[in-house]
């Protein structure tokens, strides 16, 4: 975890890096696609509210 830059001092970035081989990428594809859909929904809602 890390605090973001001074421009966004109230945000906490929660990230974790782990290594995996290319062979395991197929296992994570459905999860990555779901996360992508959630992210795009959040962006769309933010723009609509603004």
Image: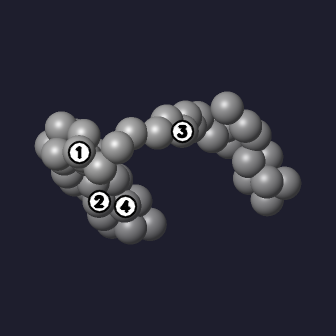
Q: Are marks 3 and 2 in contact (CB under 8 Å)?
A: no
In-front residue for pair 35/48: 35
Q: Are marks 1 and 2 in contact (CB under 8 Å)?
A: no
- Residue at horizontal 79 percent and vertical 54 percent from the top: 5
Q: Compare marks 1 and 2 and give the one earlier in the sequence.
A: 1
Question: Where residue 40 is drawn, which disc sits there?
Answer: 2
Image quarter for residue 21?
Answer: top left
| Comparing labels 3 and 2, the label whose residue is closer to the camera | 3
Q: Which SS class for mark 1? A: helix
Report whether 31 appears left or right of 45: left
Q: Compare marks 1 and 3 and give the one earlier in the sequence.
A: 3
Question: Where residue 23 is drawn, which disc sits there?
Answer: 1
| Comparing labels 4 and 3, the label whose residue is closer to the camera | 3
Can you say which quadrant of the picture contains the N terminus? Answer: top right
Q: Compare marks 3 and 2 and give the one earlier in the sequence.
A: 3
Q: Are marks 4 and 2 in contact (CB under 8 Å)?
A: yes
Q: Are marks 1 and 4 in contact (CB under 8 Å)?
A: no
Report the Cα–Cα distance between label 4 and label 2: 5 Å
Neighbor class of circle 3 (other Cα within 10 Å; few <14, some 14-19, many 20+) is: few
Question: Where residue 17 is drawn, which disc sits there?
Answer: 3
Above/below status of 48 relative to 37: below
Report the Cα–Cα distance between label 1 and label 3: 17 Å
Question: Where residue 43 is drawn, which disc sits there?
Answer: 4
* Residue closest to the far right: 6
Report the Cα–Cα distance between label 1 and label 4: 31 Å
Colour approach in the figure: one colour
Neighbor class of circle 4 (other Cα within 10 Å; few <14, some 14-19, many 20+) is: few
- Residue at horizontal 55 percent and vertical 34 percent from the top: 16
Q: Position of residue 50 (x, y in %)?
A: 44, 66
Report whether 43 appears left or right of 28: right
């Amino acid at each position: 975890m890390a605090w973001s830059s001074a421009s966004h001092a109230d945000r906490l970035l929660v990230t974790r890096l782990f290594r995996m081989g290319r062979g395991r990428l197929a296992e994570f594809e459905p999860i990555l696609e779901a996360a992508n859909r959630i992210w795009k929904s959040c962006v769309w809602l933010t723009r609509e509210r603004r």
